Amino acid sequence: MDATNASHIMASMSAPTFTTRPRVVHIVLWGVLCLALWNLGQAVALFVQLGGLAELSLMPDPRWRLAMALVWSVLFFAAAFLLWQRDLRRWPLIPLLLAVYGVYGLGIMIAFSNLRPAMLPVFVYVVFGIYSIWAVRKATAGNISHPR
């Protein structure tokens, strides 16, 4: 290959253009993925133990908890996909999803437990929710580019 061909080939191959996500968005992405995996793991554990749990007449019904864990897992995987795809128009829905999940989780703890929920889960829900609101606002305020 001569020098002219090599320079022509090198000129036609441009470097891929992509934008990097800010670190705040990566943290929200990993948090949402962790919640998706947590709920998926909870669904698998409930499915494996469904026979034994059905005999205990637990409240809420383990089948209902299994269905809800699957729904939350799908929703969080979808939210992670939106973050991964850099779809800025739908990012404000992610803090809303986290808030609804936090209320759901705490509501289940309060409604079906004899004890008050520990402060650590409440603290984690509130902090991650506030952080995700801040991260989404920061990311959608022009700090990263729109999807390609």
Image (tube, rainbow, N blue to C red):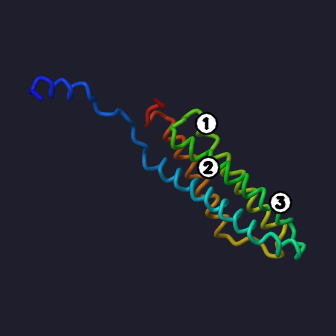
Residue 106 percent location from the top left of the image: 75, 62
Is 50 displayed left or right of 136 in the figure?
right
Seen at 54% across and 35% down, the residue is 88
Q: Dividing the picture into quarters, in which one does residue 108 lie?
A: bottom right
Seen at 49% across and 35% down, the residue is 141
Q: CA distance from mark 3 to mark 1?
A: 28 Å
Say what secondary structure mark 3 lies in: helix
Quadrant containing the N terminus in the rendered view: top left
Pick the front one: 20 or 5:
5
Say what secondary structure mark 1 lies in: helix
Task: Residue under label 3, please give it.
Answer: 64
Q: State the mark number for residue 16.
A: none
Is 19 displayed left or right of 64 in the figure?
left
Q: Earlier in the sequence, mark 2 or mark 1?
A: 2
Q: Dividing the picture into quarters, in which one does residue 9 lie?
A: top left
Is 89 displayed left or right of 146 in the figure?
right
Q: Earlier in the sequence, mark 2 or mark 3?
A: 3
Identified by mark 1, the residue type is Arg
Task: Residue under label 2, please give it.
Answer: 77
Q: Earlier in the sequence, mark 3 or mark 1?
A: 3
Residue 99 percent location from the top left of the image: 68, 51
Identified by mark 3, the residue type is Trp
Task: Residue under label 1, please give it.
Answer: 90
Q: CA distance from mark 2 to mark 1?
A: 14 Å
Residue 48 percent location from the top left of the image: 74, 69
Residue 87 percent location from the top left of the image: 54, 35
Q: CA distance from mark 2 to mark 3?
A: 20 Å
Seen at 77% across and 61% down, the residue is 66
Identified by mark 2, the residue type is Phe
Say what secondary structure mark 2 lies in: helix
